[in-house]
Image (tube, grey):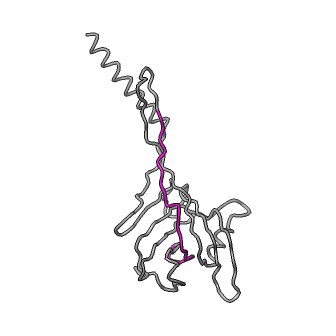
Amino acid sequence: MTTTSGWPEASHRVVLTIGDEIVGWFSECAGLTIERRVEEFREGGVNDHQAVLPGPVHQGNVTLRRGLASPTLWQWFLAGSYDAKVQRQNVTITFLDGQGEAAATWNLIGAYPRKVGGVSLGASENQIAVEEVELAQGGEGGGDGAGGGEAGGEAPEGGAIPAAKPPVDIEKLAGRVYCLLSKELRIERDRLVW
């Protein structure tokens, strides 16, 4: 997929797209992270260790820096500024190689602009110079019914971020683990007594 149509400069190799519309060209992208939180679980009577259970997955905010943006990005940020009903969009961040071809692609599901900083307007151009755009991702909605905050990666060859699964209900999981351990301990106790 070639995405060089209207490519402003060779230094702007990070492309932000909503649907089929390119809404920004940036020089840097940071924050494409996924973190799995863990829950520590101490069992009664077991003092030599504690269980560490996997918890919910959290996607960090993505920051795009030093770029040119279309007025669509600014309008997206302003939507919901008075009634707090932000418009969550599925966005794509594409990294271009030296020839302007897509080298890696990340999809952010249910993203919305959290911060736009360093805006500079030019009277002769239909683009806005932006120092920084921060996108929050995940949550409800996402346009295609994929709620729960997925962050997906579709990098052709390297470094894709895998799709995240919905968060786990830790209390329910801990209850099930406790029941299974209690049942296993009763069985072991009965075996040793006989």
For the point 52% across and 60% down, which residue is it? 31
Residues 137 and 20: in front is: 137
Residues 169 and 61: in front is: 61
Q: Is the N terminus in the top left, top right, bottom left or bottom right quadrant?
A: bottom left
Q: Which residue range is magenta in the image?
A: 19-40
Query: How many dots with numbers?
Result: 0
Question: In the rendered image of this protein, does residue 44 appear above or below residue 169?
Answer: above
Expressed as whole percent of the image width and height from the top left, the position of residue 119 reads 68, 74
Expressed as whole percent of the image width and height from the top left, the position of residue 171 reads 50, 35
Q: Main secondary structure of the magenta part?
A: strand
Question: In the rendered image of this protein, does residue 166 appear above or below residue 79?
Answer: above
For the point 39% across and 23% down, which residue is it? 182
Left or right: residue 66 compared with residue 169: right
Question: In the rendered image of this protein, does residue 152 appear above or below residue 21?
Answer: above
Q: In the figure, residue 177 lies in which quadrant?
A: top left
Question: In the rendered image of this protein, does residue 94 appear above or below residue 167?
Answer: below
Expressed as whole percent of the image width and height from the top left, the position of residue 4 reads 47, 84
Residue 25 within the segment the image draws in magenta: yes
* Residue farthest along the right direction in this orientation: 82
For the point 62% across and 69% down, which residue is it? 132
Expressed as whole percent of the image width and height from the top left, the position of residue 54 reads 43, 42
* Residue farthest along the bottom direction in this orientation: 124
Left or right: residue 132 compared with residue 109: right
Left or right: residue 191 compared with residue 76: left
